[in-house]
Amino acid sequence: MSINLATKYSNKIAQAHTHESFLAGKAKAPYDFVGVKSIRIYTLLSQPLNNYDRTNTSNRYGALSELQDSYQEISMTQDKSFRIAIDKGNNNEQMMVKEAGRVMKMQLREQVVPTGDKRALNRWAWGAGKCLEYSASISKSNIISMLLDIEKEFMDTFTPLDDRYVVVKNEHVKLIKTSDEFQYVDGVRENFILKGIIGKIGTLNIIAMPAAWFPTNAEHIAFHSRAVGFPFKIRDTRIVTDSEAVNGAVLLGRFNYDAFVVGGACDDVIVVTTSGNKCADPAVTKSANTTITSTTSGAKIYYTTDGSDPRFSASRIEYSAGINNPTAGTVIKAVAIYESGNKFTSNVTTHVCV
């Protein structure tokens, strides 16, 4: 016999996972499931304003522009499972279900949550639209300034004030609490006292997580909740009570999920690193055979010629050879990416051909 825990306790399982996870309840980007393993993210694109013409008798509002949007389609690659034997012990279904509940809580806390949160941090860091690079190591004398630099970047891109988060390593909490700025900024100090290791500096909600969960070379990862997603398509658990291989029951679990950054909102995701861990910005050299280069050896260069953002555009092209004689006025946008080399994405270079 098979007892489907997902049917009986699906809300409790989902709530337990969200409660245990540092990140699951904070990623709020809208998306749709497409097919079996894909998700689609739509982004509406704002249109430039016209000048209202009071003297125009037929059209005072200016030219009509069609509402534009863009979308990403991302494959969900994480499909994890477990199979755990529960010894018969107390030979009744009720006790086995209770034992399964305890095992499930343990699996969520010790396996599912760490694995999922690590994946989310990794995808958000490598998908970040901005990388802040510092020559100095993080210390109590500069950590508050670094966090306020993140807030400044969010202000510059008009990131909504609510639901801003920055993830720091647990070991950095002590640096924050012992920094000179912390000691003399009442609001910062009060929030930490009230909220423990999760506090607030300016508009940034601070989340402290184990350093081992961070991707290589990432020190802080900041995001707005609507700029990131952390979808779970399958949270399935059940008990098989008539297994021939076990004198008791077998607890089965499957979790299908992934994480992503919304391309059109990628500037609302920031990764902080130290010098040498960010790709050099591409350089565009215009000629009959226009070239794009980066001094970061091994980095891939992606570019567009339609004005779209090469960090996420569906029309982006991986650079492999010179662009043959682009016409005057062509806008080339290029970016360098080297995830396998543990270097974060460069800034976008924009070049207008003449």
Image (spheres, rainbow, N blue to C red):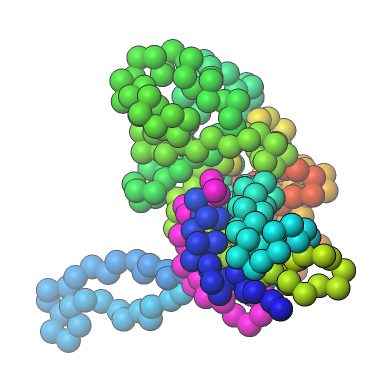
The verdict on residue 32 being magenta is: yes
Rendered view: 320 above or below 40: above
The quadrant the N terminus occupies is bottom right
The verdict on residue 240 being magenta is: no
Identity of the residue furthest to the front in this view: 91
Residue 222 appears at what percent x and percent y?
51, 43
Q: Quadrant of residue 74?
A: bottom right
Rendered view: 276 above or below 29: above
Q: Is residue 185 visible?
A: yes
Residue shown at 58% from the left, 37% from the top:
209
Looking at the rendered structure, the number of numbered marks drawn on it comes to 0
Residue shown at 18% from the left, 78% from the top:
60
Residue shown at 48% from the left, 30% from the top:
197
Q: Quadrant of residue 272?
A: top right
Q: Nearer the viewer, residue 103 or 11?
A: 103
Residue shown at 38% from the left, 42% from the top:
155
Residue 322 appears at what percent x and percent y?
78, 62
Residue 307 appears at what percent x and percent y?
55, 66
Residue 24 appears at what percent x and percent y?
53, 54
Rendered view: 289 above or below 26: below
Left or right of residue 11: residue 345: right
Which residues are drawn in magenta?
20-42
Q: Nearer the viewer, residue 265 or 181?
A: 181
Identity of the residue furthest to the right in this view: 245
Left or right of residue 332: residue 88: right
Left or right of residue 82: residue 148: left
Identity of the residue furthest to the bottom in this view: 58
Q: Nearer the viewer, residue 91 or 122?
A: 91
The quadrant the C terminus occupies is bottom right
Q: Is residue 328 visible?
A: no
